[in-house]
Image: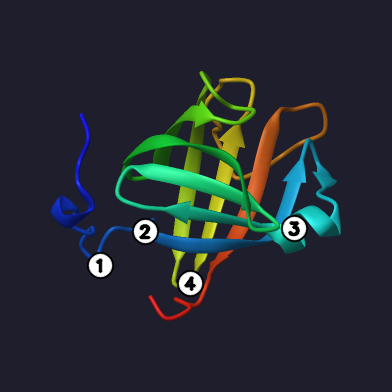
Amino acid sequence: MSVAASDYTPPAPSHPLHGTWKMIRAELAGEPAHPLLVDNTTVELTLDRYTVRYDGEIADRGRYTFTLGELHHHLMLHGVEGPNAGRAIPAIFQRKGELLRICYGLDGSAPAAFASPPGSQLYLVTYRRKERDGF
């Protein structure tokens, strides 16, 4: 199914994930991400799609669903293009104002906490909402 741009209705402002988010910190298995990765990565989230950009170029994209929970909010990414194409990646997320924290279970297991201990395949990332750049 395809939707014409003129038929697109942006999500309500209350959508907790909508926006462009700049990575400000990340770690995998307890190891901090390289500063170049952190400085050059953004994630764009619309109503049900995500696009990861590195240095302005699309690095990964797909669809996602989320549910709001009592203890953690849950996210499920379904990669369509890039290194995660065909993969389902569970995650938990927390939003506080302009900050978004996501813990991804890269091994396919849903994270139980916002932690990335050594030896795990848990990718813990904090993003800050990016200014709108005129749009």
Q: Are marks 3 and 4 in contact (CB under 8 Å)?
A: no
Q: Are marks 4 and 2 in contact (CB under 8 Å)?
A: no
Q: Are marks 1 and 2 in contact (CB under 8 Å)?
A: yes
Q: Which mark is residue 13?
A: 1
Q: Amino acid at mark 2?
A: His
Residues at marks 1 and 3, CA–CA distance in whole angstroms? 27 Å
Q: Earlier in the sequence, mark 1 or mark 3?
A: 1
Determine which residue is flagged by label 2.
Answer: 18
Residue 8 x, y percent position in the rendering:
19, 53
Question: Image quadrant for the C terminus?
Answer: bottom left
Residue 10 x, y percent position in the rendering:
23, 59
Q: Earlier in the sequence, mark 4 or mark 2?
A: 2
Residues at marks 1 and 2, CA–CA distance in whole angstroms? 8 Å
Q: Quadrant of residue 11?
A: bottom left
Q: Quadrant of residue 24?
A: bottom right
Q: Residue at x 29, y 49 (%)?
A: 47
Binning the other alpha carbons within 10 Å of mark 1 as few (below 14), some (14 to 19) or many (20 upward) gives: few
Q: Earlier in the sequence, mark 3 or mark 4?
A: 3
Q: Earlier in the sequence, mark 1 or mark 4?
A: 1
Instruction: Determine whether, in the image, residue 102 is placed left or right of residue 57.
Output: left
Determine which residue is flagged by label 4.
Answer: 98
Residue 104 shows in the view: yes
